[in-house]
Amino acid sequence: MKRLTLLALLATCLATGPVLAADPPATKPAASARKAPLPSKPSLAENGRFHAVHKNEDLNCSDCHSNEDIDPLFLRAAESQGSKGPVNREGCMDCHRSPKKPAWYVGVKK
Amino acid sequence: MTKLVRLIDQKRCMGCRACISACATENHFTPDAPWNVMIEYEVGTYPKVKKIYNTMNCMHCENPSCKAACDSVGAKAISKNAFGVVLIDYDKCIGCGYCAAVCPYGVPQLNTELTPLFPGKGKHGAETIDYADRHPTHRKKAKVAEKCTFCAHKLDQAVADGKVDRIGKDQAYTPSCDLVCPTQARMFGDLDDPNSDISKRIKATGAKQLKPKFGNAPQVYYVLEEGAKS
Protein backbone atom coordinates (compact mmCIF):
# COMPACT_ATOMS: atom_id res chain seq x y z
CA MET A 1 0.00 0.00 0.00
CA LYS A 2 2.83 2.31 0.90
CA ARG A 3 4.48 1.59 -2.43
CA LEU A 4 1.22 2.32 -4.25
CA THR A 5 0.88 5.64 -2.45
CA LEU A 6 4.42 6.63 -3.41
CA LEU A 7 3.81 5.71 -7.03
CA ALA A 8 0.61 7.75 -7.07
CA LEU A 9 2.48 10.69 -5.55
CA LEU A 10 5.27 10.35 -8.11
CA ALA A 11 2.78 10.20 -10.98
CA THR A 12 1.04 13.29 -9.70
CA CYS A 13 4.35 15.16 -9.47
CA LEU A 14 5.38 14.14 -12.98
CA ALA A 15 2.00 15.13 -14.39
CA THR A 16 1.75 18.51 -12.73
CA GLY A 17 5.44 19.44 -12.63
CA PRO A 18 5.73 21.02 -16.06
CA VAL A 19 2.55 22.97 -15.52
CA LEU A 20 3.65 24.33 -12.18
CA ALA A 21 7.17 25.03 -13.37
CA ALA A 22 6.10 26.94 -16.42
CA ASP A 23 5.75 30.69 -16.41
CA PRO A 24 2.28 31.99 -15.94
CA PRO A 25 0.50 32.04 -19.28
CA ALA A 26 1.41 35.17 -21.17
CA THR A 27 -1.36 37.63 -21.55
CA LYS A 28 -2.34 38.74 -24.99
CA PRO A 29 0.39 40.96 -26.45
CA ALA A 30 -0.11 44.59 -25.59
CA ALA A 31 0.08 45.53 -29.23
CA SER A 32 -3.55 46.47 -29.37
CA ALA A 33 -3.08 48.77 -26.40
CA ARG A 34 0.15 50.25 -27.70
CA LYS A 35 -0.90 50.73 -31.27
CA ALA A 36 -3.55 53.33 -31.66
CA PRO A 37 -6.26 52.71 -34.22
CA LEU A 38 -5.49 54.59 -37.38
CA PRO A 39 -7.93 57.27 -38.44
CA SER A 40 -9.06 56.60 -41.97
CA LYS A 41 -9.01 60.21 -43.14
CA PRO A 42 -5.57 61.51 -44.06
CA SER A 43 -4.70 64.47 -41.92
CA LEU A 44 -1.59 66.15 -40.58
CA ALA A 45 -3.33 67.10 -37.34
CA GLU A 46 -1.60 65.92 -34.17
CA ASN A 47 -4.29 63.28 -33.67
CA GLY A 48 -4.67 62.63 -37.39
CA ARG A 49 -3.63 59.67 -39.49
CA PHE A 50 -0.14 60.92 -40.40
CA HIS A 51 1.00 61.25 -36.81
CA ALA A 52 -0.85 58.07 -35.74
CA VAL A 53 1.02 56.03 -38.34
CA HIS A 54 4.36 57.31 -37.14
CA LYS A 55 3.51 56.91 -33.46
CA ASN A 56 2.72 53.29 -34.20
CA GLU A 57 6.25 52.95 -35.51
CA ASP A 58 7.44 53.93 -32.03
CA LEU A 59 8.61 57.37 -33.10
CA ASN A 60 8.60 60.09 -30.50
CA CYS A 61 7.83 63.72 -31.22
CA SER A 62 11.47 64.66 -30.75
CA ASP A 63 12.59 62.04 -33.27
CA CYS A 64 11.27 64.25 -36.03
CA HIS A 65 10.78 67.64 -34.41
CA SER A 66 14.12 67.99 -32.70
CA ASN A 67 15.77 71.36 -32.76
CA GLU A 68 19.06 69.96 -33.97
CA ASP A 69 20.46 70.26 -37.44
CA ILE A 70 17.74 72.50 -38.77
CA ASP A 71 18.01 72.47 -42.50
CA PRO A 72 18.14 76.06 -43.73
CA LEU A 73 16.88 74.94 -47.11
CA PHE A 74 13.59 73.72 -45.75
CA LEU A 75 10.72 76.15 -46.08
CA ARG A 76 8.32 76.71 -43.25
CA ALA A 77 5.48 79.07 -43.93
CA ALA A 78 4.48 81.52 -41.23
CA GLU A 79 7.54 80.72 -39.13
CA SER A 80 10.51 82.92 -38.57
CA GLN A 81 13.85 81.58 -39.61
CA GLY A 82 15.52 79.43 -37.01
CA SER A 83 12.29 78.53 -35.25
CA LYS A 84 11.72 75.02 -33.95
CA GLY A 85 9.83 72.54 -36.00
CA PRO A 86 11.46 71.76 -39.34
CA VAL A 87 11.82 68.06 -39.94
CA ASN A 88 14.98 66.82 -41.55
CA ARG A 89 13.77 64.60 -44.36
CA GLU A 90 16.94 62.55 -44.29
CA GLY A 91 15.52 60.74 -41.26
CA CYS A 92 12.36 59.92 -43.18
CA MET A 93 14.39 58.12 -45.78
CA ASP A 94 15.63 55.59 -43.25
CA CYS A 95 12.24 53.91 -43.53
CA HIS A 96 10.85 55.19 -46.79
CA ARG A 97 13.68 53.89 -48.91
CA SER A 98 12.20 50.44 -48.54
CA PRO A 99 10.04 49.50 -51.49
CA LYS A 100 7.47 48.03 -49.12
CA LYS A 101 6.82 51.39 -47.55
CA PRO A 102 5.00 54.27 -49.24
CA ALA A 103 7.39 55.61 -51.83
CA TRP A 104 7.39 59.30 -51.00
CA TYR A 105 10.97 59.53 -52.15
CA VAL A 106 10.58 57.81 -55.44
CA GLY A 107 13.62 56.95 -57.44
CA VAL A 108 15.93 56.86 -54.45
CA LYS A 109 18.49 54.10 -54.64
CA LYS A 110 20.04 52.55 -51.59
CA MET B 1 10.14 67.54 -75.97
CA THR B 2 10.30 70.69 -73.92
CA LYS B 3 11.65 70.47 -70.40
CA LEU B 4 11.29 73.79 -68.66
CA VAL B 5 13.80 74.52 -65.96
CA ARG B 6 14.90 77.50 -63.89
CA LEU B 7 18.40 78.60 -63.04
CA ILE B 8 19.13 80.65 -59.92
CA ASP B 9 22.59 82.11 -59.50
CA GLN B 10 23.41 82.61 -55.82
CA LYS B 11 26.57 84.46 -56.75
CA ARG B 12 24.49 87.15 -58.41
CA CYS B 13 21.54 87.23 -56.00
CA MET B 14 21.67 90.17 -53.58
CA GLY B 15 18.56 89.27 -51.62
CA CYS B 16 16.38 92.14 -52.83
CA ARG B 17 13.22 89.98 -52.96
CA ALA B 18 11.94 91.52 -56.19
CA CYS B 19 11.16 87.98 -57.39
CA ILE B 20 9.01 87.36 -54.33
CA SER B 21 7.15 90.61 -54.73
CA ALA B 22 6.52 89.91 -58.41
CA CYS B 23 5.21 86.43 -57.62
CA ALA B 24 2.91 87.71 -54.89
CA THR B 25 1.36 90.23 -57.26
CA GLU B 26 1.18 87.90 -60.24
CA ASN B 27 -0.16 84.91 -58.36
CA HIS B 28 -1.74 86.47 -55.27
CA PHE B 29 -0.14 84.16 -52.76
CA THR B 30 -1.12 84.60 -49.16
CA PRO B 31 1.24 84.83 -46.16
CA ASP B 32 0.19 81.33 -45.08
CA ALA B 33 1.12 79.81 -48.39
CA PRO B 34 3.98 81.65 -50.06
CA TRP B 35 4.93 80.41 -53.51
CA ASN B 36 8.38 81.94 -53.36
CA VAL B 37 10.51 82.69 -50.31
CA MET B 38 13.96 84.02 -49.58
CA ILE B 39 16.11 82.04 -47.17
CA GLU B 40 19.16 83.73 -45.70
CA TYR B 41 21.94 82.16 -43.74
CA GLU B 42 25.55 82.88 -42.93
CA VAL B 43 28.56 80.76 -43.68
CA GLY B 44 32.19 80.98 -42.64
CA THR B 45 33.92 81.95 -39.42
CA TYR B 46 34.43 85.49 -38.20
CA PRO B 47 35.94 87.63 -39.64
CA LYS B 48 35.56 85.73 -42.89
CA VAL B 49 31.81 85.42 -43.03
CA LYS B 50 29.39 85.65 -45.89
CA LYS B 51 25.66 85.78 -46.27
CA ILE B 52 23.93 83.35 -48.60
CA TYR B 53 20.67 84.37 -50.25
CA ASN B 54 18.66 81.46 -51.48
CA THR B 55 15.33 82.08 -53.15
CA MET B 56 13.20 78.96 -53.24
CA ASN B 57 10.03 78.10 -55.06
CA CYS B 58 8.66 74.78 -56.29
CA MET B 59 11.38 72.57 -57.74
CA HIS B 60 8.91 70.88 -60.14
CA CYS B 61 10.66 67.59 -59.55
CA GLU B 62 10.82 64.89 -62.17
CA ASN B 63 9.93 62.45 -59.39
CA PRO B 64 7.65 64.58 -57.22
CA SER B 65 7.17 63.29 -53.67
CA CYS B 66 4.07 65.44 -53.33
CA LYS B 67 2.39 63.67 -56.24
CA ALA B 68 3.29 60.24 -54.83
CA ALA B 69 1.74 61.17 -51.48
CA CYS B 70 -1.35 62.71 -53.07
CA ASP B 71 -1.90 59.67 -55.26
CA SER B 72 -1.47 57.34 -52.29
CA VAL B 73 -4.32 58.96 -50.36
CA GLY B 74 -6.50 58.80 -53.45
CA ALA B 75 -6.95 62.51 -54.00
CA LYS B 76 -4.87 62.59 -57.18
CA ALA B 77 -4.93 66.37 -57.14
CA ILE B 78 -1.31 66.76 -58.25
CA SER B 79 -0.23 66.27 -61.82
CA LYS B 80 2.83 66.84 -63.94
CA ASN B 81 2.26 68.23 -67.42
CA ALA B 82 4.14 67.90 -70.71
CA PHE B 83 6.50 70.75 -69.76
CA GLY B 84 7.37 69.01 -66.51
CA VAL B 85 5.38 71.51 -64.46
CA VAL B 86 3.85 70.08 -61.26
CA LEU B 87 0.39 71.51 -60.63
CA ILE B 88 -2.22 71.20 -57.88
CA ASP B 89 -5.91 70.98 -58.77
CA TYR B 90 -7.65 72.96 -56.04
CA ASP B 91 -10.98 71.24 -56.78
CA LYS B 92 -9.51 67.80 -56.09
CA CYS B 93 -7.30 68.75 -53.13
CA ILE B 94 -8.70 67.44 -49.84
CA GLY B 95 -6.42 69.61 -47.69
CA CYS B 96 -4.75 66.70 -45.90
CA GLY B 97 -1.34 68.37 -46.07
CA TYR B 98 0.53 65.19 -46.95
CA CYS B 99 2.21 66.92 -49.89
CA ALA B 100 3.56 69.55 -47.50
CA ALA B 101 4.75 66.84 -45.14
CA VAL B 102 6.70 64.81 -47.65
CA CYS B 103 8.29 67.43 -49.89
CA PRO B 104 12.03 67.48 -49.10
CA TYR B 105 12.04 71.18 -49.96
CA GLY B 106 8.97 72.07 -47.87
CA VAL B 107 7.31 73.70 -50.83
CA PRO B 108 3.54 73.00 -50.80
CA GLN B 109 1.72 74.91 -48.07
CA LEU B 110 -1.86 74.82 -46.90
CA ASN B 111 -3.64 78.06 -47.58
CA THR B 112 -5.62 78.32 -44.38
CA GLU B 113 -7.34 81.58 -45.23
CA LEU B 114 -7.92 83.72 -48.29
CA THR B 115 -6.73 87.24 -47.62
CA PRO B 116 -6.34 90.26 -49.90
CA LEU B 117 -2.88 91.01 -51.21
CA PHE B 118 -2.95 94.45 -49.61
CA PRO B 119 -5.75 94.44 -47.01
CA GLY B 120 -7.82 97.61 -47.07
CA LYS B 121 -6.07 98.97 -50.15
CA GLY B 122 -8.20 97.61 -52.96
CA LYS B 123 -7.45 94.88 -55.47
CA HIS B 124 -4.10 94.36 -57.09
CA GLY B 125 -2.61 92.08 -59.72
CA ALA B 126 -4.44 88.77 -60.11
CA GLU B 127 -7.16 89.97 -57.72
CA THR B 128 -8.47 92.39 -60.34
CA ILE B 129 -9.60 89.56 -62.63
CA ASP B 130 -13.09 88.13 -62.06
CA TYR B 131 -12.94 84.75 -60.34
CA ALA B 132 -14.57 82.91 -63.26
CA ASP B 133 -12.17 84.45 -65.75
CA ARG B 134 -9.04 83.54 -63.85
CA HIS B 135 -6.66 80.77 -64.77
CA PRO B 136 -7.45 77.62 -62.74
CA THR B 137 -4.25 78.11 -60.72
CA HIS B 138 -5.57 81.52 -59.64
CA ARG B 139 -9.01 80.36 -58.54
CA LYS B 140 -7.88 80.28 -54.95
CA LYS B 141 -9.63 78.37 -52.20
CA ALA B 142 -9.07 78.23 -48.48
CA LYS B 143 -7.81 75.01 -46.88
CA VAL B 144 -6.16 73.59 -49.97
CA ALA B 145 -2.49 73.21 -50.80
CA GLU B 146 -0.77 75.77 -53.02
CA LYS B 147 2.61 76.26 -54.54
CA CYS B 148 4.52 77.82 -57.43
CA THR B 149 3.22 76.84 -60.86
CA PHE B 150 6.09 78.17 -63.02
CA CYS B 151 3.42 80.80 -63.89
CA ALA B 152 1.32 78.13 -65.62
CA HIS B 153 -1.12 80.78 -66.86
CA LYS B 154 1.67 82.27 -68.97
CA LEU B 155 2.82 78.89 -70.25
CA ASP B 156 -0.76 77.97 -71.23
CA GLN B 157 -0.98 81.28 -73.07
CA ALA B 158 2.18 80.43 -74.99
CA VAL B 159 0.63 77.14 -76.05
CA ALA B 160 -2.60 78.87 -77.05
CA ASP B 161 -0.68 81.42 -79.08
CA GLY B 162 1.52 78.77 -80.69
CA LYS B 163 4.64 80.40 -79.26
CA VAL B 164 6.13 77.72 -77.08
CA ASP B 165 9.52 78.61 -78.52
CA ARG B 166 9.20 82.07 -76.95
CA ILE B 167 8.90 80.74 -73.39
CA GLY B 168 11.69 82.24 -71.34
CA LYS B 169 12.23 84.95 -73.94
CA ASP B 170 9.04 87.00 -74.19
CA GLN B 171 7.64 88.79 -71.17
CA ALA B 172 4.16 87.36 -71.74
CA TYR B 173 5.41 83.79 -71.69
CA THR B 174 8.02 83.92 -68.90
CA PRO B 175 7.42 83.57 -65.15
CA SER B 176 7.23 86.95 -63.48
CA CYS B 177 9.92 86.22 -60.89
CA ASP B 178 12.42 85.54 -63.66
CA LEU B 179 11.55 88.80 -65.43
CA VAL B 180 12.15 91.22 -62.60
CA CYS B 181 15.53 90.19 -61.24
CA PRO B 182 17.73 93.31 -61.35
CA THR B 183 20.94 91.29 -61.24
CA GLN B 184 19.87 88.69 -63.79
CA ALA B 185 20.35 85.98 -61.23
CA ARG B 186 17.37 84.07 -62.62
CA MET B 187 16.81 82.41 -65.95
CA PHE B 188 14.03 80.25 -67.36
CA GLY B 189 13.93 78.10 -70.46
CA ASP B 190 14.08 74.75 -72.20
CA LEU B 191 16.76 72.37 -71.00
CA ASP B 192 16.02 69.90 -73.78
CA ASP B 193 17.23 72.45 -76.31
CA PRO B 194 21.04 72.29 -76.15
CA ASN B 195 21.26 75.67 -77.86
CA SER B 196 19.01 77.50 -75.39
CA ASP B 197 20.60 80.15 -73.19
CA ILE B 198 19.72 78.26 -70.05
CA SER B 199 21.23 75.01 -71.30
CA LYS B 200 24.46 76.79 -72.09
CA ARG B 201 24.56 78.65 -68.79
CA ILE B 202 23.85 75.55 -66.72
CA LYS B 203 26.63 73.77 -68.51
CA ALA B 204 29.05 76.69 -68.23
CA THR B 205 28.43 77.36 -64.56
CA GLY B 206 28.15 73.78 -63.37
CA ALA B 207 24.82 74.58 -61.72
CA LYS B 208 23.49 71.93 -59.36
CA GLN B 209 20.17 70.67 -58.10
CA LEU B 210 19.51 70.98 -54.37
CA LYS B 211 19.43 67.85 -52.22
CA PRO B 212 20.06 65.33 -54.97
CA LYS B 213 20.24 62.57 -52.35
CA PHE B 214 16.45 62.52 -52.19
CA GLY B 215 16.24 61.42 -55.80
CA ASN B 216 13.47 63.84 -56.73
CA ALA B 217 15.44 65.28 -59.66
CA PRO B 218 14.38 68.93 -59.32
CA GLN B 219 13.94 71.10 -62.40
CA VAL B 220 15.47 74.12 -60.68
CA TYR B 221 19.23 74.50 -60.81
CA TYR B 222 21.43 76.63 -58.56
CA VAL B 223 24.81 78.20 -59.10
CA LEU B 224 25.98 77.76 -55.54
CA GLU B 225 27.88 80.43 -53.69
CA GLU B 226 31.00 79.15 -52.00
CA GLY B 227 30.01 77.50 -48.72
CA ALA B 228 26.33 77.29 -49.63
CA LYS B 229 24.41 74.16 -48.78
CA SER B 230 23.13 71.95 -51.53
Image: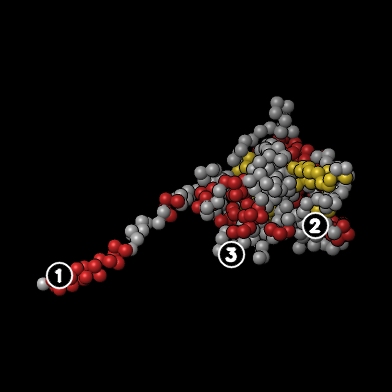
Instruction: Please give the label number shown on residue A99.
Output: 3
> Looking at the picture, which amino acid does disc 3 mark?
Pro
Residue B181 at x, y percent in the picture = 85, 44
Q: Which residue is mark 1?
A: A5
The answer to whether residue B168 shows anywhere in this view is no
Which numbered disc, 3 or 1, marks the residue closer to the eye?
Answer: 1
Q: Give the total number of marks visible in the rendering.
A: 3
Q: Tell me the residue at 55%/51% (across/down).
A: A59
- Tell me the quarter of the picture where residue A28 sits: bottom left
Q: Which residue is mark 2?
A: B208
Residue A91 at x, y percent in the picture = 63, 54
Q: Tell me the residue at 11%/72% (across/down).
A: A1
Q: Is residue B8 left or right of residue B70?
A: right
The answer to whether residue B127 shows anywhere in this view is yes
Question: Alpha-carbon neighbours of circle 1 within 10 Å: few (<14), some, or many (≥20)?
Answer: few
Q: Badge 2 sits on which subunit?
A: B
- Tell me the quarter of the picture where residue A7 sits: bottom left
